[in-house]
Amino acid sequence: EWRFLLTGQAHKVPDDGLAKPAAAEEWLTDKSWGEFRSLSTLKALRGLDHDFANHLDHWKALFDSETCHESPFPGKWNDIGDMQKMVVLRALRPDKLVESIQNFIIKYMGQRFIEPPPFDMKKCFDASFVVTPLIFVLTSGSDPTKDFFEFAAQMGMGERTKAISLGQGQGPIAARMIEEGISKGAWVLLQNCHLCSSWMDDLELIVEELNPEQTHSEFRLWLTSMPTKTFPVSVLQSGIKMTKEPPKGMRSNLKTIYFKFGDDDAIRVTNKPRTYMKLLFGLCFFHALIQERRKFGPLGWNIPYEFNDTDLDICVSQLQLYLDMYDEVPWEVLNILTSYINYGGRVTDSKDLRTIDVILRDFYCADILEDGYKFSESGVYQSVKVNEGSPHRGYMEYIESLPVNAGPEVFGMHDNANISYALTDTFETLDTLQLLQPRSSGGGGTSREDVIYDDVIEMQKTLPLDFDLEGIAMQFPTRYEESMNTLLQQESTRFQRLLAKIRSTLGQVKRALKGLVVMSGELEAMSNSIYSQKIPELWDNAYPSLKPLRSFFAEFLDKCKFLQDWIDSNTTPSSYWISCFFFPQAFLTGQLQNYARKHVLPVDTISFEFAVSQLHHSTITEGPGNGAYIYGLFLEGARYDLTVDSIVESHPKQLYTDCPTLHLVPKQDYVQPTENVYECPVYKTLARAGTLSTTGHSTNFVLFVMLPSNQDRRKWIKAGVALFTSLKY
């Protein structure tokens, strides 16, 4: 049960042909049904999958409930223990698992174990000793430096406090500061230890050699660091750890910003005070919004940028400057400076830059000067009327009236975004728990080694035969008029390398488990990965994937089969599973080359027109005259409705949907439409972020696809709508 809770895997599912009930097809995903089948092999839950159809309405009501983690289970399954209920919840509604875990902890351990203690520097100081380092564990968006210096002054140590920000060459200076502090009784603050990893061994030695008899009684060593592997473990164990969480939520962020403004005089400036106050509130709202978008992970930003108060301060100064400088508000200047330079200077992903520009234009626009201008569809967030008598108090009162937790609609997202956020929270929690697990076997039940051995045997049984690379090269020779032959050779070579690596390493692990060879560090790491259902690092030539091991392996077998079917058919496929390829950009380039060579045209003048086909790929028996049909893409943040031929809002709790078959139509000098379309990015994995490889291509981004849309493209940009070749399951 514990392993299933952490990994979603239990014993092998019996091959009894039990299918998912047809009535549950619309709301129960294949992943959830697969996990139901897997958890039904557990002793306490045996027969759950067969009994599922008998209580379908009750299970559906539980699935739809916002309090499913507190609701009764159907029939006899309500009598199972709390641990078993959490296991079932992981399969049915994993987004509610964290709340269920919290309830479990409250019931068996107490409320205080789920409530973080308040940030109390005095209490931590009182618990310290001269040889005890005090360590601030830094978090994004929070800096304890100001609080530290205020506390130092409060304790009468303001004049005897020395601080240095660590970096290249700063180690020896820091060492001298510590030496002086030890003798004179000063406080020493070493900031950003994570940026000086080469000096951490020296720091460890200094801390170990601290002698209370030779150290001034008022000396204290304070350290700040982001979580990093290079920070000395012994220092971490001997020190007192503190962390200060940044304000969370739109309301908390706005409240903090306006609290710093202090009074009316700070916001009643420029020769256009009302305009300034309106735009200032819009700017502050924008600042809070783009910070809070980070909680949605890749759906919010491809890369989680560290926007901070400095970005806001420079924008406030520029707003004051340009309002005084011009008679009319220079909207375009303010938009460009703010989105592309001040905030955009931190943004390294072009899709994120597009998002930040679209968001800002909702706030830096003429409409914001009108009272009641809506920042979101609900109207809860709006450009509030200025309180002429006391504008600062008026804005503070409005901010206090806002919801504590902002819904996805203020970010321009579907309600499903909250589920995505909760799922991310759930799986990050489970991953952390996996890292904390002991590597030795427990006393009862199936041993850890037996579980790993069974999984290895199961994978070895299903591995396909090696690809005959020489035969493929003869059967599909490199031809000027057919670039797909070259693609097939390249992809077969890549899959053969991965197949050989998987076959070899599985055999080594099997022999190591039997004691026939030494269990090396690499093989032990692979064994741990198999047990935790992670893709082993030894398979470093695998394609990018976020799937658990069992799902990854099943997908790998399907991809091998697609290539083998292509080889066996002795002709190019009528439609292509684009998700199959290691390097889909090669497939796209090959299609452009085929068209260019067929019509004797320069290849750099050819681009794709994207046509959404009404045909399902399984019904397509013949390829198009030009271009190719592709399938296997998944849409996040929206769905495609073939009846209206447009992307539309997602259904509730439907996070990902299949994209219809697309026809890539090569055309010369084709100008992509800008009206009634959404330029949808295609990524390999849900992580979205990637790095530039040596080929000049991103390791994740593939291309933009123009999807028909009957709504403004800005709606889908703010919602983070994108296509993917692979999901997490």
Image: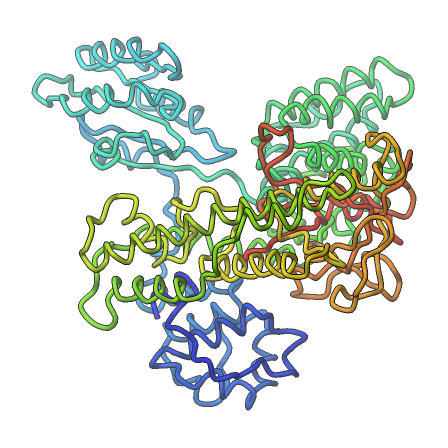
Q: Is residue 24 above or below residue 397?
A: below
Q: Is residue 718 left or right of residue 68?
A: right
The quarter of the displayed image where residue 399 is located = top right
Out of 621 and 520, give the one closest to the viewer: 621
Out of 270 and 710, give the one closest to the viewer: 710
- State the colouring used for the structure image: rainbow
Q: In the image, residue 177 lies at what x, y percent?
A: 27, 11
Q: Is residue 683 above or below residue 695?
A: below
Q: In the image, residue 183 lies at what x, y percent?
A: 17, 11
Q: Is residue 255 visible?
A: no
Q: Is residue 45 above or below residue 391?
A: below
At 57% from the left and 37% from the top, the residue drawn is 304
At 85% from the left and 55% from the top, the residue drawn is 624
State the quadrant of the C terminus.
Answer: bottom right
Q: In the image, residue 360 lies at what x, y percent?
A: 76, 34
Q: Is residue 103 visible?
A: yes
